[in-house]
Image: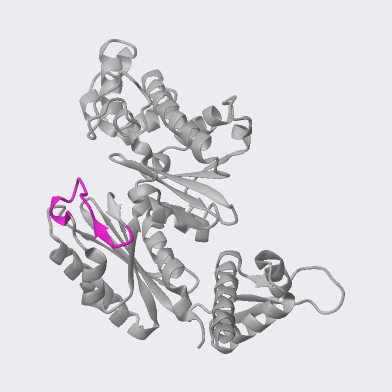
Amino acid sequence: MKDGINSKVMKSQNSLLVLKTIMRKAPISRSELTRQVGLTQASVINVTNLLLEAGVLIEVGQSSEKKQGRRSLVLDIKEDAFYNIGVELSVGKLECGIANARGTLIGFEEQYFPSNSGAEELVEQIGLMVRKFLTGLQIDKESVLGLGLAVPGPLDVENGVMVAPPNFPNLKNAPLQKMLEEKLGFRVCIDKETNLAALAESFYGASVGYKTSFFLSLFHLGISGGLISENNIFHGFRDGAGEIGHISVETAGRKCSCGNYGCLEAMIADDYILECVCHDYKIGLETECVEGIESLTLEEVFRRSREGDPVCEKAVKQTAAYIAMAVGNIINIFSPEMIVLGGDLPEMSDQLVEMVAERVHRRPYPSHCGEVKLVRSSLGPQVYVKGAAALVLEKFLVYALPG
């Protein structure tokens, strides 16, 4: 009996390994799949045949691999095999998306959500959005694997509880996972938004195929990060990993909301960048552009910098220097193969990303700094919703297996 149980567990583990690999690498041949997962060819054939029969996989053509005999068929996920839902809660808004089995968002909606709302209002609004998707797209509730929720920290991931989110005072200690499960009747999982952005990039974006990657989220207000190691999110003690916004980059810098001084989050906040630009204009570093400087936006600063304005270029260079300092610390501590920059700031300025990469790659230590790839997010603003949907696959994909 024990051997039978062990055999069943092993079969399930092998099936999950194969299915997760296909999700990240599809379309893929069985021979390449065998090399990727480290199982025997017979095991891979058995698993894929079962998944084909169950309607989870499909054959989508022939491999381009050159070898004797007939070319092998390649496999992909059947796009309507199952669905998963991703939700992101951020300041002032709630975003919800439903993804098919290949990770493509087939429905997306954004709604205003007051930051002073309570847990009941949040759960009710998510419920309305989900029901709208299922009805409009004619999706059977039974084909939904689950719902993933991306939220700001601090967070108790294991129990699905928001601990003390600074911008959501009425969600303190809110047991959102339990409340949503009871409301929707779905399996629900929850994690920090930057962890899920990192997961999304490793599933569908820039860091697919990399064993270690770091996602650094750079917004007007709020900076954080997420580390992926061997396809898994690194949470750290009390789920506190990734708080890169509170790395000190200027010992004599401005006070941060956390109480410390010179944190990255404080030194590259949009109000501080604009304050520095206005100050430099006023003291005469650029006399032609004094008029109207009080109404400058961050977008305008980045545009002027690209056009060679010395004051704005100075501000962007200083911002890049602070970010590069934090990235250097990330490399020293975690040594990821790739660092993905996401959020408003990278979206607004290619020049900023280039300046950060240039500074990081010429750091003398560690010696492999020049080899660490530093890129902008390939998934854009929807990366957090896609990450929440990907978390469902990480947690609940076993329910898509036959038998």
Using residue 394 as the reference point, say whether residue 117 is left or right of it: left
Residue 162 belongs to the span the image colors magenta = yes
Indicate whether 69 appears above or below 371: below
Relative image position of residue 248 (x, y in whole percent): 36, 28
Which quadrant: the N terminus?
bottom right
Indicate whether 304 appears above or below 234: above
Residue found 25% across the figure and 77% down from its top = 184
Residue found 50% across the figure and 30% down from its top = 355
Using residue 177 as the reference point, say whether residue 63 is left or right of it: right
Task: Name the foreground residue: 4 vs 151.
Answer: 4
Image color mode: one colour
Q: Quadrant of residue 173?
A: bottom left
Relative image position of residue 117 (x, y in whole percent): 13, 57
Residue 118 belongs to the span the image colors magenta = no
Residue found 52% across the figure and 43% down from its top = 375
Residue found 24% across the figure and 69% down from its top = 178
Using residue 74 as the reference point, say whether residue 297 is left or right of it: left
Residue at the extreme top: 284
- Any part of residue 138 in sight: no
Residues in magenta? Answer: 157-172
Indicate whether 5 appears above or below 318: below
Q: Quadrant of residue 63?
A: bottom right
- Any part of residue 6 in sight: yes
Task: Name the foreground residue: 147 vs 310.
Answer: 147
Residue at the extreme right: 68
Task: Name the foreground residue: 303 vs 230.
Answer: 230
Indicate whether 201 appears above or below 41: above
Relative image position of residue 7 (x, y in whole percent): 59, 82
Relative image position of residue 260 (x, y in whole percent): 26, 28
Main SS, magenta region, reads loop
